[in-house]
Image: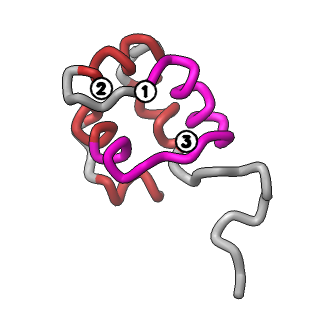
Amino acid sequence: MARIIDDENQKNIVGSKVKQLRREQHMSQQELSAKLETLAVYICRGSISRIEDGSRTVSDIELYGLSQVFDTPIEEFFQ
């Protein structure tokens, strides 16, 4: 069976979209972390960096929080 992510070091497929949306909204990683915290989604700045570079997984709760902060449907993170 084919793997969704071919690169063994790649842990998610949404990181580049997170980075794009964050930059479009002129938001720092620390600001994103703080906004997520208001939704009871706790991702530190360093973890956001690792999500964006693909070296950290993203849970469903975290993805939901990201979609809320960016006001973006979850499906858009996979495009």
Relative to 56, say whether 31 is above or below.
above
Inspect the image, locate mark 2, and give the three-letter code of the amino acid beneath it. Leu
Which region shows up in magenta? 43-64
Determine the CA span between mark 3 and mark 2: 16 Å
The residue that disc 2 covers is 36
Q: Earlier in the sequence, mark 3 or mark 2?
A: 3
- Asked if residue 10 lies left or right of residue 23, the reply is right
**To which quarter of the image does residue 67 belong?**
top left
Pick the front one: 3 or 25: 3
- Asked if residue 6 lies left or right of residue 58, the reply is right
Q: Residue at x 56, y 36 (%)?
A: 51
The residue that disc 3 covers is 15
Other residues around mark 3 within 10 Å, as few (<14) / some (14–19) / many (≥20): many
Inspect the image, locate mark 1, and give the three-letter code of the amino acid beneath it. Ile
Q: Residue at x 56, y 47 (%)?
A: 57
Q: Residue at x 78, y 58 (%)?
A: 7
Pick the front one: 36 or 76: 36
Q: Position of residue 60 (x, y in %)?
A: 36, 53
The residue that disc 1 covers is 43
Name the quadrant of the N terminus: bottom right
Residue 77 part of the magenta-drawn span: no
